[in-house]
Image: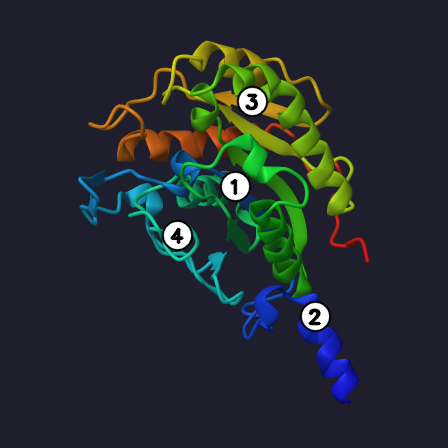
Amino acid sequence: MLAYIFLILLAHPFGVIPTNTTTTNGNKSIFILAGQSNMSGRGGVVNNNFDCYIPPECQSNSSILRLTKGLSWEVAKEPIHQDIDYYATCGIGPGVSFANSILKNDPNIGVIGLVPCAVGSTNISQWSQGSFFYNQMLNRTRAALQGGGMLRALLWYQGESDTLNLEDAELYKSRLQKFFTDVRYDLDTPSLPIIQVALTTTLGPYEEEIREAQLGIQLPNVRTVDANGLKVGPDNVHLSTSAEVQLGQMLAQAFLEFGSDPAQPHNFLKG
């Protein structure tokens, strides 16, 4: 019996057993939210203070859950990344808007489980296979699937940090393709739908190089939503609240265009 408990502890990150992963039902449609700050959400954040405005499109819904840092399910409430991207002040991101839009357009999808994993200021190398953020994402996804459900897509918005350095910009496309390929392999979902966002803001001089790399990805079942033209907040780096809402709706539309179970994703994981 003790050996069995020990094996369970090893199977979960941080030695924590999810205490509430079977909330509502075991038929969740699970979505990974990963990348850096514009996926984590900075809408409504000015001078490190969140204005606490929750737009109608981001209101909580009992059919939208999020996986907490402690690996339990709870009703998603903005800002959904605050306990994951905890070194920053988080605000509105695209995740809840995305989920509400999915439910509005496909009420038969059932319960949506969001798995927040994004962390601000991270570059693509910090998401490489075996890295801390990569492993955390895999561990959180596996924990989310323990209670049952289907992994439906990875939503990815990252790249601003890689505009700072020419070498990073030049290697971005190959690193991004490898990241997508590695995630699919390690989650044993070779055709997992991936929806990435082409950035609209920059931290350095190589924005166009990163955008060209993002728009040039040709992997199967990878779609790109272009954030170019969305309203940016006062810091000229992070999307505004209204833009995050719009982005969530754009991501939802891209997912719905895949059709019904395009990749037949499942919850079987590599042992």
| Disc 1 versus disc 3: nearer the observer | 1
Mark 1 or 2, nearer chain start: 2
| Disc 1 versus disc 2: nearer the observer | 2
Q: Nearer the viewer, residue 62 or 43?
A: 43
Mark 3 or 2, nearer chain start: 2
Image point (54%, 72%), residue name: 20
- Give the position of the C terminus as an image quadrant: bottom right
- Between the residue at mark 2 and the residue at mark 4, the CA separation in whole angstroms equals 27 Å
Asked whether the beta carbons under mark 1 and mark 4 sit within 8 Å of each other, the answer is no
Asked whether the beta carbons under mark 1 and mark 3 sit within 8 Å of each other, the answer is no
The residue labelled by disc 3 is 224
The residue labelled by disc 2 is 10
Crowd rating for badge 3 (residues with CA inside 10 Å; few <14, some 14–19, many 20+): many
Mark 1 or 3, nearer chain start: 1
Type of amino acid at the residue the image marks with label 4: Ile
Secondary structure of residue under mark 2 = helix
Mark 2 or 4, nearer chain start: 2
Type of amino acid at the residue the image marks with label 1: Ala
